[in-house]
């Protein structure tokens, strides 16, 4: 329906004072473009932003070089928008291979993300006729000065947009980027100084870091403070019927049991884009090396880096958006046990003997890699066998040990994992082949 002429005239008279029609109050709205890779933490971050009254999400672009593949990432996102009855937002997918190299997430992760954990989805809304780099450029141009980019996956789409037009990011006020590991260890197997989003396409990250776009980096340094625990599942189950958004989140979590080692990576980044006070920010000089590591470099680009996070403040923001209240009515979650490695001493606080099934938090306060291995000794194994294993420093678990479960934490991480115990089960703190301690359960005799 058209706008009545009398309203048009009134708008012309009062526009300088208050605004009118669809543009009323537009100066108070932050226009946001989200570039993501379709994993569930991306989806939750998008849901958070969609619930902010002062945010207009103007485009959703999907990188096919991250967790979910293209076009599944875009189709799932478009279907999610339909299910929660969100406003019409253009969605597009980008290329499926990095600009250079062949770094790729494990197929099992990608398969799960492609199916969005098995949650029920309606038919997706039609995708944009543009590919992701073109949609990014179009959305930036349409939004005008002050647009914010929230980048939650590999930077392939942004790099391609820059290669097509080096000035494409000139009107971007800030990019909030989930990526990198600055003072902590990474989360890529066999590349423990790298974080996945940067590692997946280091060339793309390097291209973006060589632009003049202001960047606030939310690396593992900050996200390590916000692990996913059963609390998320308990809150979602309790509040599932509050809204279409809470129903969607609860349904996904019900279909995808928590297996451990997960963090609110992208959700924290989205919250920081709205309230930077939930993190501590420092200015650093950074470059991206060829292996996908985020490296401090005197010749690097000036980057605002979130070095730590306030987990309670984050949860208040996140749950307020997802379930309508920061007061969840769910008791604070605590692990059954805590294993701490401070670089010198391994300590365990928790039940002994180990329960059949329990949740363990691994607090790694060092640059080492930390493991909790539960299992049983072969009959006849002695302390001499154990000491000989330490002296030999051979990699892996010894032949006389029958492992049941493993939980791990990278450098300076606080990972939460389910673990298995039971009668006769011993827990080993494993830092290196020569650094292993019995921390719970039956211990070897002389």
Image: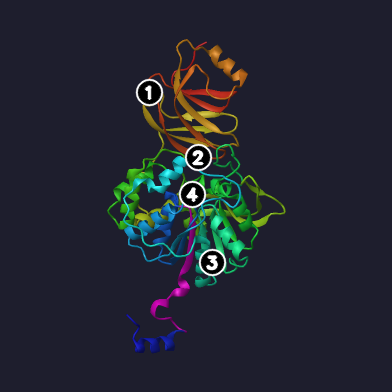
Q: Are marks 1 and 3 in contact (CB under 8 Å)?
A: no
Q: Are marks 2 and 3 in contact (CB under 8 Å)?
A: no
At numbered mark 2, what does the secondary structure look like: helix, strand or loop?
strand
Residue pointed to by mark 2: 414
Q: Is residue 86 left or right of residue 439?
A: left
Structural distance between the alpha carbons of marks 1 and 3 = 57 Å
Residue pointed to by mark 3: 137
Q: Residues within 10 Å of mark 3 (few under 14, many from 20)?
A: some
Start-end of magenta stretch: 16-37
Q: Earlier in the sequence, mark 3 or mark 4?
A: 3
Q: Earlier in the sequence, mark 1 or mark 2?
A: 2
Q: Residue at x 43, y 67 (%)?
A: 54
Q: Are marks 2 and 4 in contact (CB under 8 Å)?
A: no
Q: Earlier in the sequence, mark 2 or mark 4?
A: 4
At numbered mark 3, what does the secondary structure look like: helix, strand or loop?
helix
Disc assigned to residue 332: none
Residue pointed to by mark 1: 422
Q: Are marks 3 and 4 in contact (CB under 8 Å)?
A: no
Residue 24 forms part of the magenta stretch: yes
Residue pointed to by mark 4: 265
183 in relation to 430, above or below: below
Measuring from the top left, give residue 75's x and y in whole percent.
40, 56
Q: Residues within 10 Å of mark 4 (few under 14, many from 20)?
A: many
Q: Earlier in the sequence, mark 2 or mark 3?
A: 3
Viewer-nearest residue: 165 or 346: 165
Image depth: mark 1 or mark 4 in front? 4
Q: Residues within 10 Å of mark 2 (few under 14, many from 20)?
A: many
Q: Earlier in the sequence, mark 1 or mark 4?
A: 4
């Amino acid at each position: 329906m058209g706008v009545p002429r009398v309203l048009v005239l009134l708008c012309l008279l009062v526009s300088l004072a208050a605004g009118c029609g669809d543009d009323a109050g537009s100066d108070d709205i932050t226009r946001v473009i989200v570039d993501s890779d379709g994993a569930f933490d991306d989806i939750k971050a998008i849901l958070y932003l969609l619930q902010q009254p002062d945010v207009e999400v103007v485009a959703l672009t999907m990188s096919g070089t991250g967790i979910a593949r293209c076009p599944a990432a875009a189709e799932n996102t478009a279907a999610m928008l339909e299910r929660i009855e969100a406003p019409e937002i253009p969605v597009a997918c980008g290329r499926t291979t990095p600009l250079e190299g062949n770094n790729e997430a494990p197929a099992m992760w990608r398969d799960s993300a492609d199916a969005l954990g098995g949650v029920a989805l309606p038919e997706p809304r039609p995708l944009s006729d543009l590919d992701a780099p073109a949609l990014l450029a179009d959305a930036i141009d349409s939004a005008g000065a002050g647009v914010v980019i929230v980048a939650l996956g590999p930077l392939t789409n942004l790099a391609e947009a820059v290669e097509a037009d080096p000035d494409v990011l000139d009107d971007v006020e800030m990019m909030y980027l989930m990526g990198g590991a600055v003072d902590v260890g990474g989360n890529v197997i066999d590349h423990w100084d790298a974080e996945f989003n940067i590692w997946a396409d280091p060339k793309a990250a390097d291209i973006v870091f060589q632009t003049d776009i202001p960047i606030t980096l939310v690396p593992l340094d900050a996200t390590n403070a916000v692990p996913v625990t059963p609390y998320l599942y308990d809150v979602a189950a309790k509040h599932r019927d509050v809204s279409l958004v809470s129903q969607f989140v609860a349904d996904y979590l019900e279909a995808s049991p928590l297996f451990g080692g997960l963090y609110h990576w992208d959700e924290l980044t989205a919250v920081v884009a709205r309230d930077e006070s939930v993190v501590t920010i420092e200015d650093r000089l950074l470059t991206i090396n060829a292996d996908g590591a985020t490296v401090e470099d005197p010749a690097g680009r000036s980057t605002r880096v979130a070095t730590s996070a306030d987990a309670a403040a984050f949860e208040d923001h996140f749950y307020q958006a997802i379930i309508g209240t920061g007061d969840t009515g769910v008791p604070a979650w605590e692990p059954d046990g805590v294993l701490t490695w401070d670089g010198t001493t391994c300590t365990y606080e928790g039940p002994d003997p180990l329960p059949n099934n329990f949740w363990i938090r691994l607090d790694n306060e060092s640059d080492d890699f930390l493991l909790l291995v539960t299992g049983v000794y072969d009959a006849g194994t002695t302390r001499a066998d154990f000491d000989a294993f330490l002296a030999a420093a051979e990699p892996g678990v010894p032949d006389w040990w029958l492992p049941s479960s493993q939980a791990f934490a990278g450098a300076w991480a606080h990972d939460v994992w389910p673990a298995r115990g039971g009668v006769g089960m011993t827990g080993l703190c494993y830092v290196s082949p020569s650094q292993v301690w019995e921390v719970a359960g039956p211990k070897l005799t002389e």
